[in-house]
Image: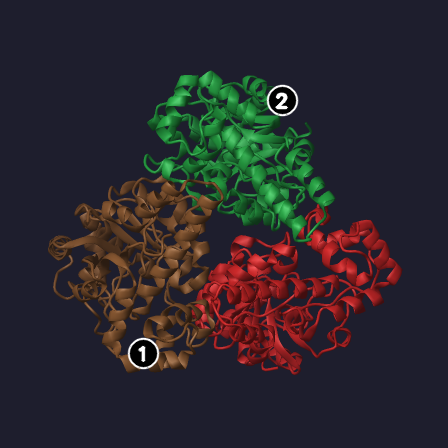
Chain colours: A brown, B green, C red
């Protein structure tokens, strides 16, 4: 009933411009070097992605890599972006460890518009070595304004740098200058709670939704400090949409925040494809408290184009399971289900980002 | 098999004495101003409450409000309290932001006895401006004793004021006097960890069960400090029943406490109607570790009479699903299921409160 | 399809050498004195254990105890160990509050080899009163080396003593001596974060896997400090397998660690039999992120031989449910399922411990 639902992917990244060996593919699937294909994510790739490359479902990993190489990365990227069924994309452009596709290229392959999400830390770090501490606040505000001319939102990776236990108040410029002096005397990597808050408030001052990395990440993250409840104070003060990304295993906590705060939206990106066919449970649990007006789709795809397709398929299945079983059990009508699906698939993102 | 199970609602509140507009109804359904009817709670109202007002299940929200108004609040209150199928009620009388029904009125509509639960903070705050710091400990003990003459339990909202990370020991009167001096010099709202502990111990000294708000609440709560595990030390020292209310999303943690401490009881009130038809999962997860001798029913209904009915229906369904599927899968016998249902529905509350 | 799967129980204990009254049996089932047989664990004993003693499934608890006594503990131990279907056992020998079966005796009854896991704290405490603070580091290293000659791993109960919030770095011997001086001046029970870390590093220096108690425990534990995420820093530094035991209700967090760190393995022992027939959900949730190459079976059986059998039955059912439903829903092939089952049942433990 919802197999063809077109989705807005409100948080994603570029994909690589090269062919991948089995080892390289595995290292993109999961952080650890072993077990990728003996995990739900790897099993889901074999099930859902192999057919897109003309292989039978469940083809062995070795055959999958061979076929991928035979087609070449351009074709592989095109097939998965095309198969994803996306209405539009919001691309975080702040992480480029190697050459990856631009938003425009992603949008062309996906067949829909690609908007930009500006990563706050990347903008700030571009000023390292180029400003004085005293000049940093104005320089950042000015640069962010310029960089966001065509952007629809900003992204904070405070979770990765200092954790989400941020003070609720906007820092004064004097505090920012003091913190900047300390930062500018060291390496460019920004990891300072005062500066991180300053960046967030600057994004909010532009009236843009602020995306936060929450919960699930890689081995560099301290997951204890990625609980979305840590953001409660800041959420109370910010007047723009706050987009809580990923959230697993704190997705119920995120659902609570989406229920009680008008400006909070949630997704289950990254976790969706990591959980493979089990993603349905994730959607069910998130929608316990999160209103259907507050859940969005994202893939958080990075590197592998498979993730665009896989997340979209799995999220659609999860949403269809929730909505369809609700109809069959009498929890709501089929017309209700259609309406709720539209909200989640397209309307919530359109409204929150003003697309 | 359990559709007719009569329940003791061991934690609930009064309902309002006025008709409600759509906006007012929505603001009672969820804290945030948007999305109430596009949430599980709103969808559950349309499914389960509309028929009680002679509307078809799933009637639109606008029709629902019109019908509510046409019937008038007296009739609406009577219908939902009557439909709830309650054996008895334990009413928290400490929160009255507007005129609401008294325990006696609620009991009359529900067709069962209504006992009082005295809110500790409300009693203490009634002494603000009327006592000296040095006189506070005795004055509170005396007033609480009087106020609890006919009460069956007390309630602490420490979670809302200072969080549940309370020290395990009874505070000395000298500490209490010092804290009271500070409190009496400011506004009446009590939010002091020493005083909050003192209140709890005074309730326990009367031999009364102590209810604690835990987990799920509104936008004012700091959910991080509402984890029931924070109460572990205090639980070890208190010699009266400790009633952990709500608990979601920490209901598994609450279940653990109910398993390992003889004096701990749990419920899933408030969460039950917030999760709508998904409440069954909540009951299942809570009963992973919580013995059937330790789970109670509560609605935590406040304001809307719908919540009395809705919680009772959803809790009964959840319990019936757990017990019934256990029978069909061979986990226990039908006779076991009947016995376990009686414990949860009536006997546990009767025993814990000495009703 | 997996009913006959032979399992390695990688974390278990001895069982008692005496007959048990109903009260004694109940006190072994759950920590609290009431509700044991009205809990999932007690209901599971009646279902799955009664037939092993020639009683019908669901026989009343009183009949069960009578039959147990009539058979005598030797026969009861033999039946349950034999029924468990174990390939091998790894027995933690560090907890002996009363005379219990040795690893060799357990292995003989189970029909497989029994390896030893040495409890770090027990080894250290045996030195209390027998060494000076200055001599403690070398004395412990030497004694641990000797005690581990035939052992396949070590076990830390830091969770019970100081919590899992341990610093990530190896403590210097000078720090250890200072901490030891403090400890040696008091009772033998070791509860010091520096010493506890020292013990862990000494185990790792022997190249042995380190087991950690995580999550679910009895009433003595502070569950807030048993979150496996607290071990993240230490996990990054240790170069040996880190075995996260129990984990509930933090099993999803444990699954994340198993996914992103090559050296992390997880189980759901103790929780498996505590959750009874609900254990299937526990296995499902753990395997959301944990690769099939990282999940192990353990019973954490202590005292009652029933737990060996019950855990094995429930874990097999849970794994069979995950793998079997995956086949029937098309998530993977039957050949995949067979391969994944072998990994979890035997191969992961064989590889991690070098059996």
**Residue highlighted by disc 2:** B112
Number of the front mark, 2 or 1: 1
Which residue bears the numbered disc 1?
A68
Chain letter for mark 1, please: A
Q: Seen in the image, is A163 located left or right of residue C212?
A: left
Q: Position of residue B142 (x, y in %)?
A: 59, 21
- Identify which residue, B110 or C216, lies in the foreground: B110
Inter-mark Cα distance, 2 to 1: 70 Å
Label 2 sits on a secondary structure element that is loop
Whether marks 2 and 1 lie on the same chain: no
Pointer 1: residues within 10 angstroms few (<14), some, or many (20+)?
Answer: some
A45 relative to B222, above or below: below
Q: Position of residue A257 (x, y in %)?
A: 37, 44
Question: Badge 2: few (under 14), some or many (20 or more) residues near its Cα, within 10 Å?
Answer: some
In the displayed structure, would residue C12 be above or below residue A255?
below
Q: Secondary structure at mark 1?
A: helix
**Is residue C179 at least partly visible in the picture?**
no
């Amino acid at each position: 009933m919802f197999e063809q639902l077109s989705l807005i992917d409100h948080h994603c990244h570029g994909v690589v411009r090269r062919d991948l060996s089995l080892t390289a593919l595995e290292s993109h699937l999961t952080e650890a070097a072993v077990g990728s294909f003996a995990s739900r994510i790897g099993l889901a790739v074999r099930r859902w992605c192999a057919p897109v490359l003309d292989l039978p479902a469940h083809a062995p990993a070795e055959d999958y890599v061979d076929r991928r190489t035979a087609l070449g990365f351009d074709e592989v990227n095109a097939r998965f972006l095309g198969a994803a069924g996306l209405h539009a994309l919001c691309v975080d452009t702040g992480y480029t460890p190697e050459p990856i596709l631009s938003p425009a290229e992603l949008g062309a392959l996906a067949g829909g518009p690609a908007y930009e999400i500006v990563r706050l830390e990347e903008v700030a770090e571009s000023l390292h070595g180029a400003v004085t501490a005293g000049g940093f606040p104005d320089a950042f505000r000015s640069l962010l304004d310029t960089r966001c001319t065509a952007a629809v939102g900003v992204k904070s990776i405070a979770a990765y740098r200092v954790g989400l236990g941020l003070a609720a108040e906007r820092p004064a410029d004097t505090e920012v200058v003091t913190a900047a002096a300390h930062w500018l005397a060291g390496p460019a990597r920004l990891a300072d709670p005062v500066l991180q808050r300053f960046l967030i408030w600057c994004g909010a001052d532009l009236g843009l939704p602020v995306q936060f990395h929450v919960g699930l990440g890689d081995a560099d993250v301290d997951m204890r400090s990625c609980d979305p409840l840590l953001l409660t104070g800041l959420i109370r003060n910010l007047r723009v949409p706050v987009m809580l990304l990923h959230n697993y295993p704190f997705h119920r906590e995120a659902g609570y925040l989406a229920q009680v705060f008008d400006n909070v939206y949630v997704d289950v990106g990254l976790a969706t494809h990591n959980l493979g066919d089990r993603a349905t449970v994730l959607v069910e649990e998130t929608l316990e408290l999160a209103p259907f007006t507050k859940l969005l789709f994202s893939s958080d795809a990075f590197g592998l184009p498979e993730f665009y397709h896989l997340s979209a398929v799995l999220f659609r299945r999860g949403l269809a399971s929730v909505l369809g079983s609700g109809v069959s059990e009498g929890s709501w009508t089929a017309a209700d289900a259609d309406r709720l699906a539209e909200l989640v698939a397209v309307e919530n993102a359109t409204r929150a980002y003003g697309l």
